[in-house]
Amino acid sequence: MTLAEAEFDRAIGGSLEGKRIDDGDARVLIRAGGDRLRALLRAAAAVRDSARRRTITYSRKVFLPLTNLCRDFCGYCTFRRSPGEPGAKTMTPDDVMHIVREGERLDCKEALFSLGDKPELAFAEMRTTLARFGHTTTIAYLRRMCEMVLENSTLLPHTNPGVMTEEDLVSLREVSASMGIMLESASPRLLERGGPHHGAPDKDPRLRLRTIDAAGRLQIPFTTGILIGIGETLDERIDALIELRKLHDRYGHIQEIIIQNFRAKPDIRMRNQVEPGLADLARTAAVARLLFGGAMNIQAPPNLALDFADSNPVPSADADAWSPLRVLLDAGINDWGGISPLTVDHINPERPWPHIDRLRDQMRRYGYELCERLAVYPEFLDKPGFLADAPAAQIKTHHAAFIQKTTHQTTYQREIG
Ligand code: SF4
């Protein structure tokens, strides 16, 4: 047995005994292939199962792209627009309420606000639009829209407006059930000329980590994660997960770690970048599971994995084992994120979400149970200090029965929260 093989076996053995792997272990495991990849995925699934059994959650949501104007230029983005470009749009309050009403009709419970970063700093047109609505910043307009949703619907706002100051977080936490920002990467190298984040000052990892740190101090249930395959090295990928783990260990505020895979599109700067395959995605999710342990929610968006064409990383006689969704489930994830029966994924509009009932049936065949959750995870619902009054009142008024109905599936999450 080589030294690397011995290190691999020791790391896997430790995680099966309930220990979280360390930084060095993660750097060995992320390079697993063949039989060792299979062992890694099995260990991650066992750690997930011991803490959470085989219940996999999702949030039934509407996606509200409040504005697609953005001051940044990321090499993989098809969402952003400059003013005057075809498709450039800032939603009016009526636009927001129209979708929220439709979402209520379809039993959605989350209003996900995802938008471009600080467009008013770059565009006079955005400043004029905001003035028309009575605001000077996009964050202030977003806050008002969340308030409007809380006052006039049953939905729970989840806000995702990019880099936020402490003041922004303080103001938005009052009207948000949960908030988030993807770290994407911890590597400042990706900001260099030719890199995916060149021209995107808000993708500086130091700023994003500062936002996640402030969210921890403010006790905000927070969603974050990494974007893989944008030019980072495997070690840089681990660096990002380690930074997030440090913040979560300090504050206990991260409610999910998203492992999102880059998908190439014909109209992006990175159209020729090779996409990460299913094996790469699965082993990254598995390493995240072992780094964070069974208590963390590890998420992979199902619509970004449905059509993987690379060879099966876990060969099996069972034909179903080849399903990309099954491979991710068997890699230790426990959440699919938001799935909408109404709106498209505006960040990846070419990739429809799976139909929820069909997903449930498919998962049953694989031995997993699909369970709906709110935007804020069950373990944060009664964690002291973590929910502001308005979202807490919304949950109590409109979702108490839902929580009770799903408790039998999620009780174990509260026990370990
Ligand atoms: S990924 Fe986000 S920050 Fe980057 S250009 Fe697109 S909207 Fe702007």
Image (cartoon, rainbow, N blue to C red):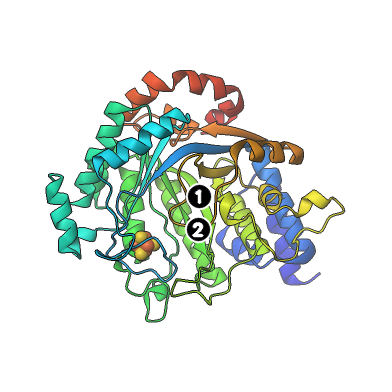
Give residue 335's quadrant in the image. Answer: top right
Horizontal arrangement in the rendering, residue 202 relative to residue 344 (left or right): left
Instruction: Please say whether residue 416 is visible from this viewpoint.
Output: no
**Residue sitting at x 71%, y 56%:** 40
How many numbered circles are shown?
Answer: 2
Query: Is residue 73 positioned above or below 283 on the image?
Result: below
The residue to which callout 2 is attached is 241
- Mark 1 falls on what kind of element? strand
Q: Residues at badges 1 and 2 in contact (C-beta under 8 Å)?
A: yes
Query: Is residue 251 positioned above or below 402 on the image?
Result: below
- Mark 2 falls on what kind of element? helix
**In the image as oriented, which residue stretches furthest toward the front?**
86
Instruction: Please say whether residue 216 is visible from this viewpoint.
Output: yes
**In the image as oriented, which residue stretches furthest toward the bottom?**
193
Indicate the position of residue 401 as horizontal and vertical percent values.
48, 18
**Residue sitting at x 51%, y 39%:** 341
Give residue 152's quadrant in the image. Answer: top left
Indicate the position of residue 194 as horizontal and vertical percent values.
41, 81
Residue toward you, 339 or 52: 339
* Ligand 1's quadrant: bottom left
Q: Which amino acid is tagged 1?
A: Ile
Query: Is residue 263 positioned above or below 251 on the image?
Result: below
Residue toward you, 64 or 326: 64
The residue to which callout 1 is attached is 257
Q: Which amino acid is tagged 2?
A: Leu
